[in-house]
Amino acid sequence: MADGTQENGSQKEPAEHVEELQPNHEGIHATAENTSEEDLNKPLVEAVSQDVAEEVGEFFEQAAEQNETNIDEGNKPYIAFEHVYKSFGSFKVLEDVSFFVRPGETLCILGRSGVGKSVSLQMLMGFLKPDQGTIRVAGENICSFNERQMLEVRRKVTMVFQNGALFDSFSVGENVAFPLREKNDLDEEQIRQIVKGLLEMVGVAGMDDLLPSDLSTGMKRSVAIARALASQPEAILYDEPTTMVDPLIAHLLGDLIERLKRQLHLTSIVVTHDMRFAKKLADRVLFLHEGTARFFGTLQELEHSDDPVLKEFMAMDELVLPQ
Ligand SMILES: Nc1ncnc2c1ncn2[C@@H]1O[C@H](COP(=O)(O)OP(=O)(O)OP(=O)(O)O)[C@@H](O)[C@H]1O
């Protein structure tokens, strides 16, 4: 229910002074400057208040341990596309696209509008199926998976949508609590503490009782990240995290994604138009162009590429986003 109406038909009062609400990112060090290594390595739990730090710390430790195991299992990709094709009618979106993401790494998918960046993420989540090729997640070919099997995959790999895709009739706190309740091994007090801590960590402390409709786009995205973290995923797919937010929020979201990678060893795919954002986060880059994987390699390789299409894309980005 996009209008924020409660499921039982009652209407929740909109938050007072909503226009005055600002994300409160003290915990993640708001500054438009480049964040120091020291800050990026500062334990995530330092951003949460004392009364919930122990519970949240334990929750993060579990998540980090689980993801470290994936890294220890060797250099095998956690996610891979192998010769993937996808068309809609006669319109070919992807033709023979291959790439991989190793455990704990961040892949940025770049490219102009309409080249199949979001379609790639949707295929990984099983919302769309490829016409040909293989898509592997955690070693398994998911292409023929049924809905029940895909639900298992979505416990490991979760997506942060552009609009947050929050449950509109649930409060912010209930949205974040949802995956925690599904786990069935936490009591209400533990859930309350973890929700509070996660919201503090992503910079929307104290907004538990608001409805998603009370929040700005950047805040919705922060809550969506908190909800994703609540399911202790192995990988997070971010669809255009910096679209429609101001540069400071974009910077903060970038720092958060980097800290989650470093400290929870999360495998990540970030779809973006924003070359500077990719430079900040990517271990590897996939550049989609006219249906093909025009480039797949490390950031250094991208920067040294002589491909005129890539050079033009990078030059345009410098113009659109002045330093
Ligand atoms: N379910 C669908 N049915 C038909 N066409 C679709 C569907 N989903 C996507 N497309 C088309 O596939 C193409 C690629 O879409 P996609 O959303 O992946 O682009 P994108 O690279 O993410 O672009 P943007 O940066 O603008 O979001 C577009 O032309 C889009 O209209």
Image (cartoon, rainbow, N blue to C red):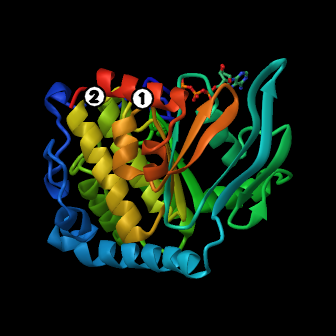
Q: Which residue is mark 2?
A: 14
Q: Depth check: 282 or 185 in front?
A: 282
Look at 43% across and 51% down and name the residue there: 300
Q: Is residue 291 above or below residue 29?
A: above
Look at 25% across and 29% down and name the residue there: 246
Residue farthest along the top direction in this orientation = 90
Q: Is residue 209 left or right of residue 78?
A: left
- Give neighbour class at mark 2: few <14, some 14-19, many 20+ (Cα, 10 Å): few
Q: Quadrant of residue 56?
A: bottom left
Residue 211 visible here: no
Where is residue 320? Give x, y as percent: 32, 21
Q: Which residue is mark 1?
A: 4
Chain-order first, disc 2 or disc 1: 1
Q: Quadrant of residue 85?
A: top right
Tell me the distance, in whole angstroms, between the alpha carbons under discs 2 and 1. 9 Å
Q: Which mark is drawn over residue 204?
A: none
**Mark 1 element type:** loop
**Mark 2 element type:** loop
Residue farthest along the front direction in this orientation = 306
Where is residue 29? Give x, y as percent: 15, 54
Where is residue 161? Give x, y as percent: 50, 38
- What amino acid is labelled 2 in the image? Pro
CB under 8 Å between callouts 2 and 1? yes
Where is residue 234? Give x, y as percent: 54, 65
Look at 40% across and 62% down and name the residue there: 261
Q: Quadrant of residue 187?
A: bottom left
Q: Is residue 272 above or below residue 187?
A: above
